[in-house]
Amino acid sequence: MAFFGIDLGTTFCSVATIDETGRPVSISNEAGSNSTPSCILFDGSDTPVGEVARKQLFVPGANAIGRFKRDMGTSKTYELDGNTLTPTELSCLLLRKLKEDAEKMVGPCGEAVVTIPANFANEAREATLAAARSAGLNVKYIVNEPTAAALYYAFNGDAKVSGNYAIYDLGGGTFDISIVKINGQDVEVLATDGVSKLGGDDFDRALQLVVQKKFLALHGETLDDADFDRNEAEEQKKSLSKRDSVKARVNRKNIELTRSEFEEALSSFIAQTEMLCESALEQAGLEPSDIEAVFLAGGSTRIPLVKESVKRTFNKEPIAGANVDFVVSLGAALYAAHKGDPSKLSSAQRNSIEKMSVEERTSKYFGTLSMDSENARSESRLSNSIIIPKGEVIPCEITKSFSTIQDGQTAVNCKVTESGTPETDPRFVKIIWEGELELPPGRDAGQEVTVTFGYDDNQTMNCRFLDVGSKKETVVDLSPGSAKMDSSNIDKFTVE
Ligand code: ADP
Ligand code: MG
């Protein structure tokens, strides 16, 4: 039974396993490629997943869908070929295809680890787990993409890697920066930051706009998005990583695009990544000079301007591993073996990962809303109390005490909040769960209610609200509606 590491990317996915000697290796898909586009085409009875679907993605009227990872854990739905599908269901279809293809190459999957962006919200994490399980994968753990990449780099460099490192992951849809401490094969995450909607897709769009503007200036013609579509923009963007200028043929006319024009269009995105790098360094309490090396992950790190920006921010030349497209899945395969049932490993495999350890941290603040008791009577002032801070080592469990504020109070309104910054103002936090804790009648104010939040190894949260006096408890189910999927809705599709 093989261990699978699955990089479930916004634009591309890859699957890896560990070989008999315990080294991580990529697994190719049915079409012979090590990466599978995260696209699905709804085309009557067939549901092709991958390259065929990717080619149709921006074709008007085609029933192709992609980029649904950006909506994981939200209530967004997609109407396709008469079907209504959630991002979780679409991810499930994609994962089924990845599983099927990889199993054809290396045999049945025993345990799998799926990766997620470090700053994925709790709902998106839960939705990813639900999608993987419905796809028939035995997934106990998910791991943050930059952590998986760090594991791979640590493993590859073996004992030579020691000190503080940055993992800079810029893909098609998301940007993640993590500061980690590596000692041999020990990886400890010190800080992480990122933005869930910044990546190659935005760069493709930016290049498309450059072409439209330039075409108008040169030929006086206004272009539609379809005249130079996003797939063409992506191809030209990739060429511009190698060449200073490229020629495109648009509406039977030639147009030249230069790297510097493209770079200018990227400047605000690059500025944003630089700020996030600085913020991650600050959270870790480190200076650029404290970083031994910057490891790259994600296809967009091939862009020369991106490399220059990393070099400028950290004052050193970034390092690209074997292949920036696969470092995440390769690291996830190592993590799967590390976390998996040791009896399923050969002795060579066990030896290879024996020295590995991972210490992960939370990437968001989790709290609850409580009434400020002093102000309760005059002006009811709700405030957000943080229970689990960002940067807390996982797994963790933290309990905080609160008191009831009214005599005869028979219920407490319980809320679980999430935020990227340490907010006290309820207006700036996201409420991810709301419920009630019933209390026995006839008691004075000031009864103790404890709130316990735990964050597991598998990166999901469990919370409970307890009335200490009566031992009554409300246990929170954080899996969002979008994660509770009805597999019959997707069982009708045969993924190809
Ligand atoms: P994700 O994990 O978000 O799916 P990937 O890490 O697979 O993303 O990276 C995909 C992105 O990398 C796409 O936007 C693709 O256009 C971009 N990319 C791949 N190769 C190059 C290149 N040579 N130059 C610029 N961008 C590239
Ligand atoms: Mg990625």
Image: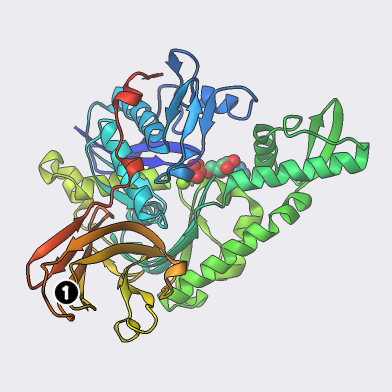
Quarter of the image that includes the C terminus: top left
Q: Is mark 1 within 8 Å of ligand 1?
A: no
Residue 434 image point, x, y percent: 30, 58
Q: Is residue 145 left or right of residue 443?
A: right
Which of the 4 quarters of the picture holds residue 106? top left
Q: Residue at x 23, y 27 (%)?
A: 108
Note whether residue 363 is visible.
Answer: no
Amino acid type assigned to the residue bearing label 1 in the image = Gly
Depicted 354 relative to depicted 278: above or below? above
Q: Residue at x 54, y 26 (%)?
A: 64
Q: Is residue 204 left or right of residue 321?
A: right
Residue 252 image point, x, y percent: 85, 25
Depicted 187 relative to depicted 257: above or below? below
The one nearer the camera, 91 or 271, is: 91
Residue 38 image point, x, y percent: 47, 34
Quarter of the image that includes the N terminus: top left
Q: Residue at x 67, y 43 (%)?
A: 205
The one nearer the camera, 267 or 106, is: 267
**SS under mark 1:** loop
Q: Is residue 341 left or right of residue 316?
A: left
Q: Residue at x 19, y 72 (%)?
A: 409
- In the current view of this chain or complex, which residue is farthest to the bottom? 374
- In the current view of this chain or complex, which residue is farthest to the left? 470
Residue 76 image point, x, y percent: 46, 40
Depicted 416 relative to depicted 283: above or below? above
- In the current view of this chain or complex, which residue is farthest to the top? 45
Note whether residue 186 is visible.
Answer: yes
Q: Which residue is mark 1?
A: 408
The one nearer the camera, 333 or 435, is: 435
Which of the 4 quarters of the picture holds residue 19? top left
